[in-house]
């Protein structure tokens, strides 16, 4: 069988879709309508054309506006004219002699007016104009030679005329109405005085109705039940509002509510997820004493020892490289600190990070070093990983140990659990954002701007804020006392506070102070400690 030919249209494939009705085409938009559509909603990439200019020819693509400017003489050629020869100058004067202005006032000569005079006038001897006859001077016009009485009479005559013509009365002048003053006096007042009150009582009376005024003037009758309820529910002058005073009969010292026992933990223990044995609630006084003892030990180490290694050997009585409880108690007794056993145990627990009951050199350098001002000394007994070189520092320091309040990574708040989404990743896998308050990761700049409020770890801590030094009242802080200074600065400071030291004696004191620092740096605190040691010998210095 042969294939039958079908007259049906074959569907056209357009990409992924099949045109089922190829013979149906969308009607085209008429040009009259299309120009309005192009104004409101043009095709993508087409320019918006106002419908009033849709059929205008596009002449702006090839029209050039303006007139082509032809170059003329330059400003330099006009200002600096080329020089002419004598022949050129004579020729130019001959050409310009035909003008009448050149004949009247030639270049370089004054204007000659004798050409317009008649021939009969001798202009060198003839005088033109009228002779001026001098009369009164300006001084006589301003200050006339008249008496005061004559001036007043002239003024009154003029004033009377101005009163008639312009009603020009002076201030406070009575108007002459030509009354018969034989019956009345000039100071009499006519009419009846209108009563006036500045508080507006007459206006208020005119705005009120008589019925309302009578109602307000009548007595206000109130029910006793309503009055009693008002006393119980509303505040009364000079009395305390007590709605249940008549129904509740209790003594004056009665306390309402249930007595709750205080919890063993505080807000800080909850935030830092501490174990029951590490709860710090109720230990505020003990912690304050511990901070004071730690601060005193730091100052004693800085004053009596030149390096951390020397201070650690003084504490380590056994020489085994560890400081136990007995060694720490003996050192505290030598410094004049008689500590309670509980405070001593707390100090050991605070400094002992690895929880072995002993304090090694790394822990000693972290918790008993005065603001990182003391050098290490001989680092031969330390491991290389225990020493770090900070940016901008000249020598290595002991690595920093972290301890204390750190929340665990799996800690979640109740609000995060309530707003949690099922199937979403936990907050443990989220990146922690923010910048620490104390930027110990950055080296402090040598010169700080006034606008720089960053704490690089060299500012005072909480103990310094709670127990400030006496020098802070005079705007002198610890960083100023421990700052390395030159010999001239230290001598000037001692002279300003009233300590006069001879030059040869100051040289000896400077050498003793320089020996106490590995790099030979001297601060005000170092010089003060040297002077304290030499206080018994009064021949070294004298107080002015």
Image (spheres, rainbow, N blue to C red):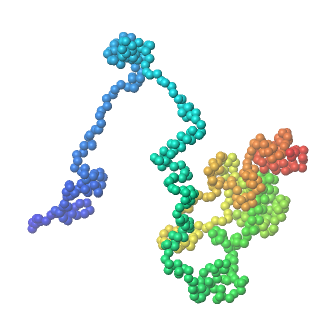
Depth order, front residue of 489/2: 489
| Residue found 68% across the figure and 80% down from its top | 260
Residue at the front extreme, as displayed: 182
Please say whether residue 242 is visible from this viewpoint: yes
Q: Is residue 94 above or below residue 500?
A: above
Q: Position of residue 67 (x, y in %)?
A: 29, 34
Residue 113 drawn at (x, y percent):
39, 17
Above-or-below relation of 279 to 536: below
x and y percentages locating residue 454 in the rendered image: 63, 54
User: Is 443 on the left or on the right of 162, as rendered?
Assistant: right
The C terminus - image quarter: top right
Whether residue 236 sits left or right of residue 98 in the image: it is right
- Residue drawn at point x = 52 percent, y = 78 percent: 213
Kindly identify the residue that appears in the image at 87 percent across and 45 percent down.
Answer: 542
Q: Quadrant of residue 76?
A: top left
- Residue placed farthest to the left in the image? 1
């Amino acid at each position: 069988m042969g294939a039958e030919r079908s007259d049906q249209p074959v569907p056209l494939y357009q990409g992924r879709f099949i045109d089922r009705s190829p013979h149906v085409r969308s009607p085209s938009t008429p040009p009259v309508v299309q120009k309005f559509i192009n104004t409101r909603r043009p095709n993508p990439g087409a320019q918006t054309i106002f419908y009033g200019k849709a059929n205008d020819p596009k002449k702006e693509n090839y029209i050039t506006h303006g007139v082509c400017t032809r170059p003329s003489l330059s400003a330099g050629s006009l200002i600096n004219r080329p020089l002419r020869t004598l022949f050129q100058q004579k020729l130019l004067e001959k050409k310009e002699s035909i003008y009448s202005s050149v004949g009247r006032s030639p270049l370089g000569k004054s204007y000659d007016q004798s050409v317009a005079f008649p021939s009969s006038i001798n202009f060198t001897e003839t005088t033109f104009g009228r002779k001026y006859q001098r009369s009164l001077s300006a001084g006589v016009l301003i200050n006339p030679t008249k008496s005061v009485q004559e001036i007043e009479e002239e003024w009154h005559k003029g004033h009377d005329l101005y009163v008639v013509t312009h009603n020009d009365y002076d201030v406070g002048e009575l108007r002459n109405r030509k009354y018969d003053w034989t019956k009345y006096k000039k100071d009499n007042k006519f009419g009846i005085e209108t009563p006036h009150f500045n508080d507006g009582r007459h206006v208020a009376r005119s705005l009120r109705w008589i019925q309302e005024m009578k109602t307000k003037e009548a007595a206000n009758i109130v029910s006793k039940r309503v009055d009693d309820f008002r006393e119980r529910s509303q505040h009364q002058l000079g009395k305390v509002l007590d709605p249940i005073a008549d129904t509740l009969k209790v003594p004056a010292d009665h306390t309402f509510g249930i007595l709750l026992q205080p919890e063993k933990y505080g807000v800080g223990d909850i935030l830092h997820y501490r174990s029951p044995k590490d709860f710090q609630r109720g230990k505020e006084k003990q912690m304050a004493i511990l901070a004071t003892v730690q601060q005193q030990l730091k100052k004693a180490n800085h004053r009596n020892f030149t390096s951390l290694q020397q201070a650690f050997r003084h504490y380590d009585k056994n020489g085994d490289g560890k400081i136990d409880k007995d060694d720490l108690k003996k050192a505290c007794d030598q410094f004049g600190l008689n500590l309670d056993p509980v405070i001593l145990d707390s100090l050991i627990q605070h400094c002992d990070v690895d929880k072995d009951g002993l304090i090694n050199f790394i822990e000693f350098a972290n918790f008993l070093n005065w603001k990182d001002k003391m050098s290490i000394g001989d680092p031969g007994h330390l491991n290389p990983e225990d020493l770090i070189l900070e940016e901008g520092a000249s020598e290595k320091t002991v690595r920093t140990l972290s301890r204390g309040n750190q929340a665990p990574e799996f800690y979640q708040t109740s609000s995060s659990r309530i707003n949690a989404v099922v199937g979403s990743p936990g907050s443990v896998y989220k990146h922690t954002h923010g910048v620490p308050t104390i930027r110990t990761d950055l080296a402090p700049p040598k010169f700080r701007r006034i606008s720089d409020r960053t704490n690089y770890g060299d500012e005072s801590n909480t103990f310094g804020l709670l127990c400030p030094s006496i020098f802070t009242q005079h705007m002198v802080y610890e960083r100023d006392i421990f700052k390395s200074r030159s010999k001239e600065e230290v001598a000037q400071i001692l002279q300003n506070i009233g300590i006069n030291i001879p030059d040869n004696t100051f040289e000896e004191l400077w050498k003793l102070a320089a020996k106490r620092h590995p790099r030979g740096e001297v601060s005000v605190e170092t010089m003060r400690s040297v002077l304290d040691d030499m206080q018994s010998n009064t021949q070294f210095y004298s107080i002015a």
